Amino acid sequence: MTSDNQDEHLLGAVASALVTIDELRDLTVFQMPYPATVQRALDRIVLHCLRRYARPPKSVPGLVRWGYERHLGGWPLTLPDGVYPADGFLVDAESGAPTALCHEIALCAETDNPLQEASRRMATMTDLASEYSQAPAYGTLRGVLATHPVLTNDLLNNVRFANRLGALDEHLGDFYHPIGLEYEIDGAVFPCANCSTPLRLTAAGSWWCEREECGTGGAVSPGAPLDWDAKVLMQMGRKHRQFVSGPGRTVLRIANSLKLPGVTVRRWPVHGPGDLRVELPGVHAWTALIVDWHSPVLLGRAIAVAMSRYGADTAIWVVAQYRVDADPDYLRVVREHATVATGTPQVCSEEEFTDMVRRHSKESGHA
Ligand SMILES: [Zn+2]
């Protein structure tokens, strides 16, 4: 994190601790005492509260309770204006899991370059694909990860059989871990009907999907259940699912909608930046980076870092449509916070991007 606001650092440490606690919720790996980072975050917030004459959380469970009972505006922190939504929460009250916003705050606190850090594992895969001259295998792997947040042992083998992963084939299994007990409901796991991510059943009896996209259109509903005994595997860590494979769904959706005459689309090219390379041969070429963040401010800051360090200013940042639909100001705020000395990046919505390509395709006489 580049900010020198101490309260903002503290919020980052707390968000990071809440993410760590959530990862410990699988009781098979739970051990006392709490990890040092969690204990340290609690100690820091307690000390901070005492200095501000505020009543501190008494324990780690008390800190978690703050996460879902107190909106950010109610924390005894002096945060920079307009960065953190006053009505935002760190923990979702229904599921008890950290919110997408909490994961974004944690990621930004843990690294100076969030967009690069979130996809570090994929960078190893691009290196491998490049080394073996198997660029298409990387795009195929990304497609598999975007499509299958959950698999059984048998389904994993089917996916490997159905997709040409080449040198990356032996690494596919590394992205999947045995699913946690919190997803077991009456001997089954229920993937989300919309995105296939395993759902949690809330205390109120409703379904909760970790992808905010699924809750925006109404109630979340389960698809066909997977038998718990079929050895269900979940795609690794929420950070990876939220920042890498989740936005991959948007990449696939855009690629699908750009099946137009004269337009070539490459998904996840190995050489050079971008999630999509879209070309009207001889006329136009675009490199698009697809992003799907809850907070437009934190996203803008992350883009600013990526631009200033890696020169991604020739690419277009494309925001998942449902984010823009939910907040008419979203793109403006991203641009405002993504602006660096060398300029303002191109930021647009999913629909603006596909409309632009369609228009150029038409003008060039293809469609
Ligand atoms: Zn879902």
Image (cartoon, rainbow, N blue to C red):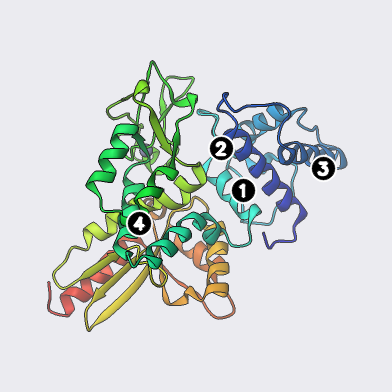
Which of pointers 3 and 4 indicates the residue nearer the eye? 4
How far apart are the alpha carbons under marks 1 and 2? 10 Å
In the image, the residue with mark 2 has its CB under 8 Å from the nearest atom of ligand 1: no
Q: Earlier in the sequence, mark 3 or mark 1?
A: 3
Q: Position of residue 56 (x, y in %)?
A: 79, 33
Three-letter amino acid code of the residue under disc 3: His
Q: Which residue is mark 4?
A: 167
Quarter of the rendering containing residue 15: top right
Horizontally, is 1 left or right of 324 in the view?
A: right
How far apart are the alpha carbons under marks 3 and 4? 51 Å
Q: Earlier in the sequence, mark 2 or mark 3?
A: 3
Q: Earlier in the sequence, mark 3 or mark 4?
A: 3
- 94, above or below 107, in the image: above
Image quadrant in which the N terminus is located: bottom right
Three-letter amino acid code of the residue under disc 4: Ala
Q: Are marks 2 and 4 in contact (CB under 8 Å)?
A: no
How far apart are the alpha carbons under marks 2 and 3? 22 Å
Three-letter amino acid code of the residue under disc 1: Ala
- 49, above or below 317, in the image: above
Q: Secondary structure at mark 1?
A: helix
Q: Are marks 1 and 2 in contact (CB under 8 Å)?
A: yes
- Residue 193 has which mark? none
Quarter of the rendering containing residue 364: bottom left
Q: Which residue is mark 2?
A: 98
Q: Which residue is mark 1?
A: 106
Q: Secondary structure at mark 4?
A: helix
User: For the residue carrying disc 1, how many other residues have a C-alpha within 10 Å: few (<14), some (14-19), or many (20+)?
Assistant: many
Q: Position of residue 111 (x, y in %)?
A: 63, 57
Q: Which residue is mark 3?
A: 48
